[in-house]
Structure formats: structure tokens, C-alpha cells
Image (cartoon, rainbow, N blue to C red):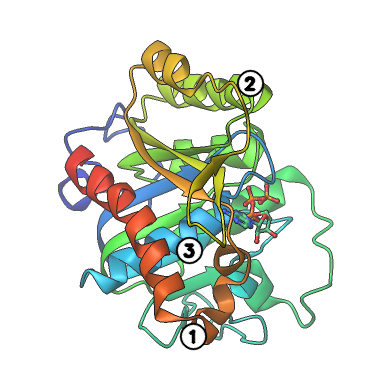
């Protein structure tokens, strides 16, 4: 049964207790449920989910990731957990836990082979994603980050209607077409009465390997106007870097590369904590 007193969205939610369909797992106590959304595919939403989780974990928070991108689940690979499986009984599933203690649930952990496609109709996918909330034993978490499916379709709608999302972080890239599509996702959140907390601009620039100078990839960027139009803060700008593309092998990188990424991600974590 839904229970507003234990809900992470208590105080910021537009649903009413009588009609709310959120059924919490009695073994999960989650303080903040944060969705990571983009509207457009391929902009780095899953990568940003993983980077945020790693940074929050480094800062001492207890973190989980729900991979709700059911037809294109990439979190296991990005977390270096591609060969793991999740196990459980009839009504409880244990998440996979990574080397740093980040708890992860993805449909790929339930498939025999990660290359197996999920050819399911929308309502079945929607039910499966709801089970990631109700049946997974998340335990005590400060943050559950949800890697939302790309776009503003059926599964995104189900998640917004059925899960107590405290706020959404939008991921964009510096192209006008992307910000137009991300605007649709922002407007969807508004309609669903879910607070958009801020924006991470990914693939904003590259760093010259010789002089370490920042090189912006596009001459004109309408991000400032986009943020103003939507009254949103820019949490961080992330460079294109090999380490992000290979985040599952972050142990192989130099401390300089790790420090550079930490520095780029720090404002994103600070922005998120401030917005809550
Ligand atoms: N800043 C970056 N630097 C280098 N590569 C990146 C960066 N951000 C993302 N990538 C790479 O771009 C590809 C797409 O990233 P990712 O899967 O995170 O995007 P997505 O928005 O979640 O995609 P989808 O819509 O398919 O879920 C991946 O191969 C990822 O490694």
C-alpha cells in the first residue's frame, strides 16, 4: 500500500494518497529518488547517471542505480558489471553490488545473455520497471538514481506516475536540436508535477592534450538562452574524454585523468545537493 509518511517525495509531490499507486518495498528506505533524463537518445544520460553515482559514493553517500532504459540497458557495462546476474525469490530481487558498494538493478542482470533483445509490449515493460521499485531490495539508500528511458514515451510516463521521484536531472549536449528535444522532456516533467533540478551539458568541449586548453566543439551554443527560458541552473559542463567512454575501466586511468573528471563532475554533485 502507498504510504506518504515514508515516501521520498513527501512534501514535493502532486499525487494524493488515496489514488497513489506507489507500493514501496518494506526493506527499502530511500531518501532521494532522482531521475536522469534527456528526451533524446545517445547524449550520455547513462554515462552521467554512472558518473553521478560514483561521485556521490565517493562523497560518502549510499547510492543505487535503477536502469530503467529497459530496451537498451547500458548500466551494467558502464559499471563494469556486464557478466553479473541478479538473484531472488518470488517477490524479492537482490540488486548487484559493485566494488564500491553501489547497488545496481538492470533487466540485463535477469537475462541469460546480455545480447538477448527485450521484445516486449509497452505494458509488460512498464510492469517490469515498476517491479524494480516494488520487488528489488534496495535497503537503506541516500540516493537512488534512475537512468530513464530515452524520450517521453510510455515507460517514462509510467515511471513518473508510479515512482516517488524527488527531482529530475536533464542531460543535454550543445546542439540546438538537442535542447529543443530536451525542452519536451522538461515540459513533460512539468505536466507530471516533477521538479527539474538542473541540467548537465555533456560533450561540451575537448581538452587539448598538448596545452590542456579547453576547445569548445560548437561555435554557437544556445545553452544560456535555453536555461533562462526554462529557469534552470546549469549543474556542470562535461568534456568529451576517453575516461568517460571507458568509465567501466576507470582503475586503468592515471590519477591526473581521474582528477580532471572529478573536477568537472564536482559542480554537478554540488548543484544536485543544493537543489534538493
Ligand atoms: N563525455 C563523453 N566523452 C566520451 N564519450 C562519451 C561521453 N558521454 C557519453 N559518451 C559515450 O557516448 C555513448 C552514448 O552514451 P550513453 O549510453 O551514456 O548515452 P545515453 O543518452 O544514455 O544513450 P541511450 O539513449 O541509448 O540510453 C557511449 O558510448 C558513451 O560511452
Q: Position of residue 62 (x, y in %)?
A: 26, 71
Residue position for label 1 = 251
Q: CA distance from mark 3 to mark 1?
A: 15 Å
| Element on which disc 2 rests | helix
Q: Is residue 26 something that shows in the picture?
A: no
- The mark that comes first in sequence, 2 or 1, is 2
Taking the image as shown, residue 60 lies to the left or right of residue 235, namely left
Residue 16 visible in the current orientation: yes
Residue located 44% across and 62% down the image:
51
Please give the label number shown on residue 176.
2
Ligand 1: image quarter: bottom right
Q: Earlier in the sequence, mark 3 or mark 1?
A: 3
- Asked which secondary structure carries label 3, the reply is helix
Q: Nearer the viewer, mark 3 or mark 2?
A: 2
The residue positioned 60% from the left and 73% from the top of the image is 76
- Check the picture and name the quadrant holding the C terminus: top left
From the top left corner, tell me how far across and down residue 188 is, in percent: 51, 23
Q: Where does the image place residue 21, in percent across and percent down from the top left?
A: 41, 42
- Rounded to the nearest angstrom, the CA distance separating label 2 from label 1 is 35 Å
Residue 102: % across, % down: 39, 76
State yes or no: Cβ of the residue under disc 3 lies below 8 Å from any atom of ligand 1: yes
Residue at horizontal 56 percent and vertical 55 percent from the top:
208
Residue receiving disc 3: 50
Residue for point 20% across, 73% down: 60
Query: How far separated are the C-alphas under marks 3 and 2?
Result: 25 Å
Question: Of tags 3 and 1, which is closer to the observer?
Answer: 1
Determine crowd level at label 2: few under 14, some 14-19, many 20+ residues with C-alpha closer than 10 A.
some
Q: Is residue 86 left or right of residue 238?
A: right
Viewer-nearest residue: 93 or 44? 44
Amino acid at each position: 500500500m502507498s504510504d506518504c509518511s515514508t515516501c521520498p517525495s513527501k512534501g514535493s509531490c502532486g499525487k494524493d494518497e488515496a489514488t497513489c499507486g506507489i507500493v514501496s518495498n518494506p526493506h527499502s528506505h530511500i531518501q532521494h529518488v532522482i531521475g536522469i533524463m534527456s528526451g533524446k537518445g545517445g547524449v550520455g544520460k547513462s554515462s552521467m547517471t554512472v558518473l553521478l553515482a560514483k561521485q556521490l559514493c565517493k562523497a560518502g553517500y549510499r547510492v543505487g542505480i535503477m536502469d530503467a532504459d529497459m530496451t537498451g540497458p547500458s548500466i551494467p557495462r558502464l559499471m563494469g558489471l556486464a557478466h553479473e546476474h541478479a538473484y531472488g525469490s518470488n517477490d524479492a530481487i537482490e540488486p548487484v553490488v559493485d566494488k564500491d558498494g553501489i547497488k545496481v538493478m538492470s533487466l540485463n542482470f535477469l537475462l541469460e545473455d546480455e545480447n538477448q533483445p527485450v521484445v516486449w509490449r509497452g505494458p509488460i515493460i512498464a510492469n517490469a520497471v515498476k517491479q524494480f521499485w516494488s520487488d528489488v531490495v534496495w535497503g537503506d539508500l541516500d540516493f537512488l538514481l534512475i537512468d530513464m528511458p530515452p524520450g517521453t514515451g510510455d515507460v517514462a510516463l509510467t515511471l513518473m506516475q508510479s515512482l516517488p521521484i524527488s527531482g529530475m536531472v536533464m542531460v543535454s549536449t550543445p546542439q540546438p536540436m538537442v535542447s529543443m528535444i530536451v525542452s519536451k522532456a522538461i515540459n513533460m516533467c512539468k505536466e507530471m508535477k516533477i521538479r527539474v533540478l538542473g541540467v548537465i551539458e555533456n560533450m561540451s568541449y575537448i581538452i587539448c592534450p598538448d596545452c590542456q586548453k579547453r576547445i569548445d566543439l560548437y561555435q554557437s551554443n544556445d545553452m544560456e538562452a535555453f536555461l533562462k527560458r526554462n529557469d534552470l541552473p546549469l549543474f556542470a559542463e562535461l568534456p568529451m574524454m576517453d575516461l568517460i567512454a571507458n568509465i567501466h575501466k576507470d582503475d586503468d586511468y592515471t590519477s591526473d585523468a581521474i582528477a580532471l573528471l572529478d573536477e568537472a563532475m564536482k559542480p554537478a554533485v554540488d548543484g544536485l545537493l543544493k537543489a534538493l
